[in-house]
Amino acid sequence: MSNTMQLGGEVTTVKELFNQFKNELAETLNTKGIQQFIESKISQTSTDKENWISRKKTAEKLQCSYPTLKSWVDYGYLNSYKIARRVYFLESEVNEMLKSCKTR
């Protein structure tokens, strides 16, 4: 199989075509709109100072067992987030749950 192609009268290798495509794609991705979008997402995540707490600390804070905590997640009372094979909770959401469950 040949690594050359003839396009519009000129002979081009597959590697040259790939490099041309790669350069055109890079130019497209470097447009201001995409850069602004990425920068806004980066700044948004850096301004969000959410504290993530482990399942263990969440259970301690709520004074419940792991199975109870899982049940509350299953029933939708609390959101859990799986990050790299571990389960975490947002401290703000745990605090909200505590506030909503206070008895009068």
Image (cartoon, rainbow, N blue to C red):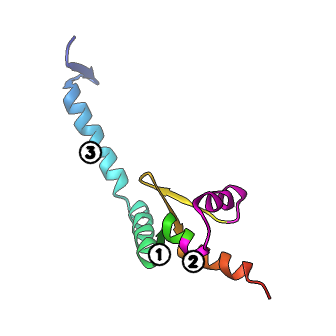
Q: CA distance from mark 2 to mark 1?
A: 8 Å
Q: Which of 16/92 is in front?
A: 92
| Residue beneath disc 2 | 92
Q: Are dots 1 and 3 in contact, CB under 8 Å? A: no
Query: In the rendered image, which quarter contains the N terminus?
Result: top left
Between 72 and 76, the one nearer to me in the picture: 72
Label 3: few (<14), some (14–19) or many (≥20) C-alpha neighbours in 10 Å: few
Residue 77 in the figure: left or right of residue 30: right
Magenta part of the chain: 60-77
Say which residue appears at 48% left-offset and 76% top-offset: 50
Contact? badges 2 and 1 (CB < 8 Å): yes
- Element at badge 2? helix
Whole-number angstrom distance, CA of label 3 to CA of label 2: 45 Å
Q: Main secondary structure of the magenta part?
A: helix
Mark 2 or mark 1, earlier in chain: 1
Q: Which three-letter amino acid code belongs to the residue tagged 3?
A: Asn
Q: Quadrant of residue 16?
A: top left
Q: In the rendered image of this protein, does residue 14 appear above or below residue 28?
A: above
- Residue 76, quarter of the rendered image: bottom right
Identify the residue at horizontal 49%, vertical 71% (top origin): 57
Q: CA distance from mark 1 to mark 3?
A: 40 Å
Disc nearer the start of the sequence (3/2): 3
Residue position for label 1: 51
Residue type at mark 1 is: Asn
Q: Nearer the viewer, mark 3 or mark 2?
A: 2
Quadrant occupied by the C terminus? bottom right
Question: Which structural element holds mark 3?
Answer: helix
Element type where label 1 sits in the image: loop
Query: Residue 80, percent across and down?
Result: 57, 61
